[in-house]
Amino acid sequence: MSSDSPRTPILCSLYRQYLDDQDSAGFVRSVSARYTSGTLQRLCEHPEREVRRGAVLALGFVGEYDVNHTLGRALHDDDRTVRVLAENSIRNVWPRAGSAAQRHMLAAVIRLVAAQQYTEAVRQATDLIEQAGWFAEAWNQRGVAFFRQNCFIESIRDGHQALEVNPYHFPAAASMGQAYLQLGNPVSALECFRRALRLNPNLEGVRVQVERLSRTIEDR
């Protein structure tokens, strides 16, 4: 397997090739043949930004949930492209916790939420949570379903649980902020939005909410 060296890692060339041909399957094959997950995580700290971009992209394709911390740090990278890739990649790895059966259950919940079948989504997410309470995305998806049913207190509770399990889960923090707004609690909403921004400073929509709520609260 390849490892860090004074020369630019071959990962940089693989990343450039991917940009040219957009062949994700070929990129995954080439990266998997040369790098372990641990090496890719170390390359996320490489001084060359293209290497970091390639590493973060690769982890989104091949990484398991244990790369969550590395990708969470990459959300604060100096390079904007690294940050964007890190956001996409970390969202991709969150559903990869648990067994194959549990991932299948989560996928079903996500489909139900997308289909606006919120009652059934809550039921199936609850089944998964009872089986795997450490599955943060299960809590988050149930929280989304509760929110869409106007069950805002329940949605906030599930957002808290998602963040307890996965402290990098910025969508859960942002969703809690929206739920607090629906409950007429702008102070708590602002706290949640600020937390989401601390986790992922690239959330421009959340940044706008923070600025608006800050002015509103100050003007009271």
Image: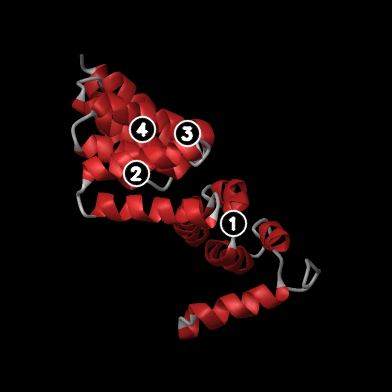
* Amino acid residing under circle 4: Phe
Residue hosting label 3: 163
Which of the two labelled residues, at mark 3 and mark 1, occupies the earlier sequence position?
A: 1
Name the residue beneath numbered marker 1: 64
**Does residue 144 sit above or below 33 in this rendering?**
above
Which residue type does callout 3 highlight?
Leu
Mark closer to the chain start, 4 or 1: 1
* Residue 57 rendering spot, x and y as whole percentages: 54, 65
* Residue 198 in sight here: no
Q: Which residue is mark 4?
A: 193
Q: Earlier in the sequence, mark 4 or mark 3?
A: 3
From this view, report whether residue 166 is shown above or below residue 51.
above
Residue 69 visible from this viewpoint:
yes
Cα separation between marks 3 and 1 = 19 Å
User: Which residue is the site of mark 2?
Assistant: 124
The residue mark sitting in front, 4 or 1, is 1
Looking at the rendered structure, the secondary structure element under dot 1 is loop
Front residue of 161 and 85: 161
What residue is rendered at 81% in x and 69% in y?
A: 6
Q: Amino acid at mark 2?
A: Gln
User: Quarter-wise, where is residue 162 in the image?
Assistant: top left
Q: Is residue 20 left or right of residue 58?
A: left
Q: Nearer the viewer, residue 201 or 109?
A: 109
Tell me the amino acid under the disc marked 1: Glu
Foreground mark, 4 or 2, reads 2
**Would you place residue 220 above or below residue 98 in this image?**
above
Q: Earlier in the sequence, mark 4 or mark 2?
A: 2
